[in-house]
Amino acid sequence: MASRRVIGVDVGGTKLLAGVVDARFGVHHRAQRSVVGLDQSALLDMAVDAVREARDAAGGEVAAIGFGIPCLIDQRTGTAVIAVNLSLADIPFRDVMAERLGLPVFVDNDGNVTALAEHQAGAARGAREAVILTIGTGIGAGLILRGELYRGSIGAGAELGHMVIDMDGPRCQGNCPNYGCVEALASGTALVREATRLARERPRSGLGRALAAGRDPSGPLVTELAHDGDAVAIEALTLIGARLGVAIASLVNIFNPEIVVVGGGVIAAGELLLAPARAVVAERALPPSRDVVRIVAARFGAEAGMVGAAMLAFNGLARLAEEA
């Protein structure tokens, strides 16, 4: 197994990242695609194309493929039931991709595969109780309970991004029917929305001037300007971090985790996001849980989902070998 490689594929709400990963979780080749606006058929074609690019770059020596997708998964059949931020619904994803790619395919929710990465080799390594959150277009999550990944009764559990933190809050995005979810209020999408509002209110700020100059009001721009000291960009991240802290406080009360790991694209903001979250948890969570929990950045950063998808593939191959 040590010499074998797999491909991990992280499908997000805006982009897809595929990489060839070895058994020590080193990434050798990457292929990235935008998935914005794609229907289901085009999304599947894009995924196949990215995997083939990565496999060709590796010389074809790939044993399996793991997918992490932002979708509710029925693990009994490998079916992608419904996605909030993508056009994926009621498709036997595992079998379809295995047929098209000619290799064993393993699929799980993107939050779950991120949790695998951080628990097996990242910031939550060795923890028996951990919460892993991924902040991007939406908010994905994974749970480690008693040292094992928790998936729920059929594999669709741990949708912590759809925990309500404001019952009178805004409608959640995409296909979620709820209101006031933490995803609606503290995701990368929410960050862009709040940063744009603040920039319009204060057009003389660095962020206000950047938007007036035609720059895309994206999460990376907000993070860049915040690191440069722009007060409006910092305020936007502080607001999102505080809202995230409200959600984490409840998760700390419910699960009493040793550690909460925060990953996804928005974690590029680092302490500008995490410090406000920690402050809210210190105020709102119950002792003794609040006194022992650590809230940290993901070790694998924005690539945690891709690495975790590769781990899913390695674990799946090992299970198949045991069953043979």
Image: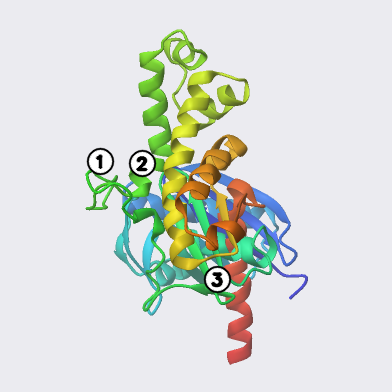
Are the two marked residues, 1 and 3, in contact with CB atoms closer than 8 angstroms? no
Q: Is residue 171 above or below residue 144?
A: above
Residue at which label 2 appears: 185
Residue 151, horizontal then vertical, whole percent: 44, 72
> Who is closer to the viewer here, 94 or 108?
108
Residue 241, horizontal then vertical, whole percent: 48, 39
Please report whichever mark, 3 or 2, sits nearer to the chain's N-terminal start.
Answer: 3
How packed mark 2 is, by other alpha carbons closer than 10 Å (few <14, some 14-19, many 20 or more), is many
Amino acid type for the residue under numbered disc 2 = Leu
Measure the C-alpha gap from mark 3 to mark 2: 39 Å
Q: Secondary structure at mark 3?
A: loop
Residue 79, horizontal then vertical, whole percent: 36, 70
Q: Secondary structure at mark 1?
A: loop
> Who is closer to the viewer here, 98 or 261?
261
Disc on res. 170: 1
Q: Residue at x 42, y 26 (%)?
A: 195
Asked if residue 181 can be seen in this view, the reply is yes
Please report whichever mark, 1 or 3, sits nearer to the chain's N-terminal start.
Answer: 3
Looking at the image, the residue that sits furthest to the bottom is 324
Measure the C-alpha gap from mark 2 to mark 1: 8 Å
Give the colour scheme of this rendering: rainbow
Amino acid type for the residue under numbered disc 1 = Pro
Relative horizontal placement of residue 41, taking residue 255 as reference (left or right): left
Residue at which label 3 appears: 103
How packed mark 1 is, by other alpha carbons closer than 10 Å (few <14, some 14-19, many 20 or more), is few
